Image (cartoon, grey):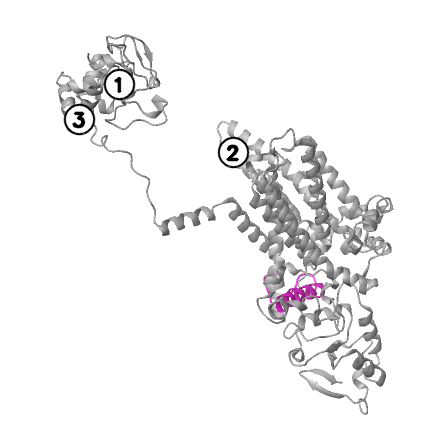
Amino acid sequence: MTTEQSGVGGRSDADSRPAPEETGAEKSPAPGDTRDEAGARSGGTAASTDAARVDAEHGTGRRAGRKRRAGKKSPAVTATVASGGATGDEGSGTTRGGQGGTGDDTTTKADGTTKADGTGDHVTGTSDAEAEERDDKPADPFSAFGPAPEPVFGRVRRAARAVGRFLVHEWTLAAVAALAVAVAMTWPTLRYPRYTLPQDYWDPSLQAWQMAWSGHILRTDPAMLWHSNAFFPENWSFAFSDTLLGYAPAGLIGVGPEHAVLRYNIMFVLAHALAAFGAYALARQLGAGRIGGAVAGAGFAYAPWLLAQAGHLHIISNGGIPLALAMLARGHGWSLRYGYRPRRRHAGWAFAGWLVAAWQLSLGFGIGLPFAYLLAGVVLVAVVLWFVRRRRVKRPFGRRLFLADLFGGLVFAVVGGLLAIPFFKVAELHPNAARTLAEIQLYSPPASGFFTAPAESRVWGELHEGARAVLPWSPEMTLLPGFVLYALAAGGLFFSVWRVRHRLFLLAGVLVTMALGMGTRFLGGRFTYVPLFDYLPGWNGLRTPGRMMLWTTLLLGLLAAGAVTAFCMRVRELAAERVPPWPGPWLRLATLVPLLLVLAEGLNVTPHPVVPQQPAVMRIVDGPMLVLPSSQNLDQPVMLWSTDRFQPMVNGGSGFTPNSQTQIREATVSFPDFASIDYLRRVGVKTVVVLPERLGGTPWEGMLDRPVEGLGVSREQVAGAVVYRL
């Protein structure tokens, strides 16, 4: 029998086996290896197989190759091939012989070659001359070697590769881009970060003090967290307004007013970056493209109406809301565009989403409370859907994911409950802290507010000056999310990657949140805001309904992301179809236009006033003390000045004024006299600090001309201030 008759086309036994892709087998046998089972099935003997192995081990294969080139066949090779043991697989493309290994059957090989009959004239689809010419070619000297092994990198090289992959990852690039855009869009916040504050130095001073106090007290005496140094002698004073407690780790760094101002400005920029990144992550998780997600992020973080909230860090710090929703959606394998995908479930992401939600709640109930009720509603709907579909969907909820939701939701609930205790205590001790419907009516914006920009808007500020003039309280009623965002969202109702029903759900969410944002201005609030105010625990503590615009902006951004994603997909199709393709890059650049327009509407002219310098006396005197003059706005910088020593003091500014503070201010208008001094002593005040340069135009304007003889107090000049020691 010749080699051609065996169906290998003149190849030696070592190279007669086809590659795995030719045979379809899971693993190709190693060169020189022969399967005994195959040899037995083909009528060969075990002796022939053993001879082939011995021949291969002693270099007989090389001698057989030389004989073959001389027109001779190696007996060992012939025996091996005749036994059919070259592959032992019917799917390999070689023909197995019958009883005598004649190979009379016609077989189609995996590579398309056929053996016509047992003569071997057309075994491999080539002529004898071609086969002979191929046999005469010298063998590739490198064919005897196996494939090069995968390189094994050292620890440093592996670490460098991991760092490189991290640096070019989408989320790394998105985070860096969010930070860079935040610095640019909030400029000049970081121009003089130790000495200026955005918008004004009243509420920002209060919030800078809040971060400083939380860091200071956690470092010194955590049990006194809720009993701050301000509003002496009141307890639970740290809960008089939203606390920004989630920023306490930042408060651990630095001491004094300059560090407090620097900390505030850094967190102000980071809050914008987190808002953009969180909305981007949510849009991407729901199925939007990168540019669509960027539009959603920019629209959410830099909506014109938020420029009026530049002095309220607890409102700007909203990025945990979309980020937590994105993590929860990813953990549950759910996407708006692709639906529920069980294989993409990840318990870790779900648990992380609950932790981020708890952190967001710790920044304040002003925007955290509606978020908490939203999550409660989502959980309720999810439970109902699971109960309805539990028989149609196999294992819709894995055990690990269930445990992640159980413990994550428990953490969120515990954090919310612990944070709520001080606020309920304040409501119990200070009934005047509760909001009334009359107050809600005062801050409820009309429908025109949704199309009016604040004065801080670079694009629309001056143009909307007349519209702002007719609003009762324009800082909380200029709620324009951006005309570009409106237009993109409207386009997303008709041209989008979202399904039609999802677009309608998003539209319904926009309309519902707008109605809630109008407070009592929409049908008197009887069917929207008032029931929530009356029946939902904690809702009566929210003063400004217009801040529900936060949710409207997020939903508009998701509608816009769907439209921009569909537009980008269409642009890619057009770029691929054009001949020549040179207009392609210009079309791709056109997809950035919506993003640039959304950012342009977010440009600001926010003032950055210089913070009043801390009087040196604040670093010297002890408390409990009273700093005069005193009022809501005047006391907020005083709180900032106390961040060196945190002396107990009567001064303080928040969302409401406790009765004790009002009484002290009224009693000290005639200070110094017997009645005011006696009252302060009974309260526990030991020192009164008067700042002469601030007395003008206040009820305490002439107090420095009053004598102190016979009153039992001392008066002295200390570092430009007048100090009375009681």
Give the image location of residue 502, x and y in percent.
68, 34
**Residue located 76% across and 46% down the image:** 451
Give the quadrant of residue 188: bottom right
Whether the magenta-drawn stretch holds residue 255 is answered as no
Residue position marked by numbered label 2 in the rendering: 584
Secondary structure under the numbered disc 1 in the rendered image: helix
Q: Which label belongs to residue 54?
A: 3
Q: Position of residue 447 (x, y in %)?
A: 81, 45
Q: Is residue 292 visible?
A: no
Q: CA distance from mark 2 to mark 3?
A: 64 Å
Label 2 vs label 1: CA separation?
Answer: 61 Å
- Determine the secondary structure under disc 2: helix
Label 2–label 3 contact, CB within 8 A? no
Mark 3 to mark 1: distance in Å?
16 Å
Image position, residue 722 (x, y; %): 72, 83
The residue type indicated by label 2 comes to Gly
Q: Let me know if residue 490 appears in the view.
A: yes
User: In screen coordinates, is 476 left or right of 322?
Assistant: right
- Residue type beneath disc 3: Val
